[in-house]
Image (cartoon, rainbow, N blue to C red):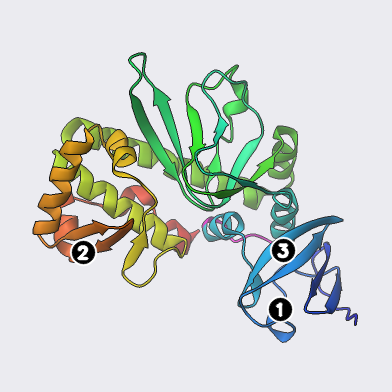
Amino acid sequence: MYRKIACAAPAYFSVETSGLKLALMDCSIWIDFCKYFSSNQYSTITLNNVNVNCAMTGCFMTNRFVDKLNGFSKLRSEEVAALFAATAQAKEIPIKTDLIREGDQPGPVLVMLKGWACRYKILPNGTRQVLAYLMPGDCCDLHIGLLAEMDHSIQVITPALVATIGRLEMDEIMDQHRGIAKAMYLAQLIDEGIMRAWITSMGRRSSVERVAHLMCELYLRARNIGLIDGDELELPLSQLLLADSLGMTPVHLNRVLKVLRESQAMIISRGTLNIKDPRKLVKIAGFDENYLHRRLRVTV
């Protein structure tokens, strides 16, 4: 069964599911799929002659990278189509796989579509410092190709779905689509704001404040991209990983978590973060969300 729908955007793709094949010619990515498909199913998408499995949620295709950039700068339908095409050939990456290592020659732009990753650095004495966490929708190292080699490593910390965009292709996309370029630059500026907040924590916040601040940040970032289930966040970070990101030993971190648990501000249990009293946790952390620039999602 075939149905054709004409819209404005210069894209071609087809959808096949449950024995129904829908051919869409010159069609906006944001077409109302609800007319044809039930929610929460998987479909085969052919976008620019590339087959890709894509989760269908509600009435649109889920791509957190597109969603994130569209939140920063309202993208035109052809810009959305370009991003879907660029990230179409994503790969499943096993847990604890290094996407790139310190000393490697920088490669393509990495896009996290599912799963978490971290930036880290190994010191001469063998200890590790985690430098940042990457969530679904985050993009790694837009301009790192200007350098001769990587100065840190990136590793997935959960099973992940990662797309790669070649440097020349990324340059071409940003040259041709000002909305994408603007959104990418805004995302990069927010990443730099997060880095400054981490430096401030490491240098001036107490251990309790440091842990509380990171939990506030991760919770808010996850909520922005729809990862929160009720009041809980599935936090795929071991105590060792958290300790390495906070400049603590696991034993010290465990003591701090006990303090926060006894204060009834938050609790981490079996890989789940539950913020019991948001106001209390924010007060303990001295947390000010302005460095995440959430207002940009509304005003830009």
Q: Position of residue 143 (x, y in %)?
A: 58, 31
Disc 3 from disc 1: Cα separation: 15 Å
How crowded pointer 1 is (Cα within 10 Å; few <14, some 14-19, many 20+) is rated as some
Report whether 255 appears left or right of 82.
left
Disc 1 from disc 2: Cα separation: 37 Å
Overall secondary structure of the magenta section: loop
The quarter in which the N terminus is drawn is: bottom right
Per the image, label 2 sits on a secondary structure element best described as helix
Q: Magenta residues, as a range?
A: 72-77
Kindly identify the residue that appears in the image at 49 percent across and 28 percent down: 153
Amino acid on which disc 2 is placed: Pro
Front tag of 3 and 1 = 1
Q: Which residue is mark 3?
A: 77
Per the image, label 3 sits on a secondary structure element best described as helix
Amino acid on which disc 1 is placed: Phe
Amino acid on which disc 3 is placed: Ser
Front tag of 2 and 3 = 2
How crowded pointer 2 is (Cα within 10 Å; few <14, some 14-19, many 20+) is rated as some
Q: Nearer the viewer, residue 175 or 234?
A: 234
Instruction: Please give the label number shown on residue 167.
Output: none
Q: Earlier in the sequence, mark 1 or mark 2?
A: 1
Q: Which residue is mark 2?
A: 278
Q: Which residue is mark 1?
A: 33
Q: Position of residue 292 (x, y in %)?
A: 37, 50
Q: Position of residue 204 (x, y in %)?
A: 17, 34
Is residue 239 in sight in this rendering? Answer: yes
